[in-house]
Image: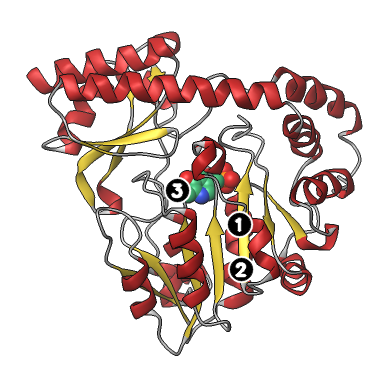
Amino acid sequence: MSIALRAPSYIRAISPYVPGKPITELARQMGIAVEKIVKLASNENPRGMSPKARKAVEAALAGAERYPDQFDLIAALAERHGVAAEQVVLGNGSNDVLDMAARVFLAPGRSAVFSQHAFAVYPLATMSAGAECIVAPARHYGHDPAAMLAAIRPDTHLVWIANPNNPTGNFLPQAELRAFIEKIPPHVAVVLDEAYTEYLAPTDRADAVAWIGDIPNLIVTRTFSKIYGLAGLRVGYGVARAEVADLLNRVRQPFNVNNLALAGALAALDDHVFVADSFDLNRRGMEQIVAGLKHLGLDHIPSHGNFVTVAVADGAAVNHKLLQQGVIVRPIGGYGLPNHLRVTIGLEAENLRFLEALDKALRA
Ligand SMILES: *Cc1c(COP(=O)(O)O)cnc(C)c1O
């Protein structure tokens, strides 16, 4: 019998994560020059990283022979959120923190609840821990608090919430979200994934980290991959009660965030101008793309992130025609949305390339 068959059945049942197609891969496959390709597939910041972060990363190269020290970034994040350093857990991307939460609270015989069309990492993390996935039906493509509460079973130990959600861009307003989380039984851990929170309109933003004081089962995660533009460096974090953070740290690899990522994140955190400019660019790009989609007669799911999900007749077919024109977006059939494509808001010229390619793809 193959050694592969000896892995637990819950590991063998995992469907691998499908990332956005890398530019280099499309270049190889289609023979298109790398410079001619537009990638709007992974919700990366089209402006690159903050110049201050880049400088800090370059300087950090000098100490690459030493193991990393997380002290400074943890201290800065604790100060930013008004919490104790013991409450902050760093991750190799926030994905790493999601995995830690699953390993701490889930196990075979336990279950986790998340919404239909929610982020693909939730089933991955849940199944890696041997737990069962319970998928609550979505409401208008987004999280339905009532359905998620009803889905909680006696063996449920974790609820995953993405706000805003990826790939749909839906968002639960602060009051509704808080009321929902308060109704989750206190013995069930709640992971509130706020990867896109910096893209919310200021009036929509909630300080969910402050809720941890009243809601001890809450873990809030954030990332440097999205508005901060550091997706390739891999750094994110979670904030929780100190006793919860302590458990997350026990399953964390000791040196999970590298020197360059630590330095880049620390500098990025203070580059408020870069974040504000990225926010403005996204708002304008969202208007540009939404207007373009309307002009093409296409429906979209109103989005609160740096991406928008558009209804086309056949996602895979349209995607193929976009790829042929050197435009990479994200097909989301794996999220139960085979008739939609998700496009990341890019630079003005990239958005235009996408809209023109989409127009051609629909008419071809
Ligand atoms: C992009 C994303 C993340 C962040 O992933 P990183 O590991 O921090 O790069 C987390 N949650 C959601 C919903 C995302 O879309």
Q: Is residue 74 above or below residue 133?
A: above
The yes-or-no answer for disc 3 within 8 Å of ligand 1 is no
Direction bottom: furthest residue: 154
Gap in Å between the C-alphas at discs 1 and 2? 9 Å
| Quarter of the N terminus within the rendering | bottom left
Identify the residue under disc 1: 208
Identify the residue under disc 2: 218
Residue 44: x %, y % from top left:
51, 30
Q: Earlier in the sequence, mark 3 or mark 2?
A: 3
| Quarter of the C terminus within the rendering | top left
Task: Identify the amino acid type marked 1.
Answer: Ala
Question: Which element type, helix, strand or loop, lies under badge 3?
Answer: loop
> Which label was assigned to residue 129?
none
Q: Earlier in the sequence, mark 3 or mark 1?
A: 3
Q: Residues within 10 Å of mark 3 (few under 14, many from 20)?
A: many
Gap in Å between the C-alphas at discs 3 and 1? 13 Å
Residue 52: x %, y % from top left:
76, 21
Task: Identify the amino acid type marked 3.
Answer: Pro
Identify the residue under disc 3: 164
Say which quarter of the image contains residue 139.
bottom left
| Front-lying residue, 330 or 72 | 72
Residue 332: x %, y % from top left:
29, 44
Residue 340 visible, this orientation: yes
Say which quarter of the image contains residue 51.
top right
Cβ–Cβ below 8 Å for labels 1 and 2? yes
Task: Identify the amino acid type marked 2.
Answer: Leu
Q: Which residue occupies 68% across, 21% down?
A: 273
Q: Residues within 10 Å of mark 1 (few under 14, many from 20)?
A: many
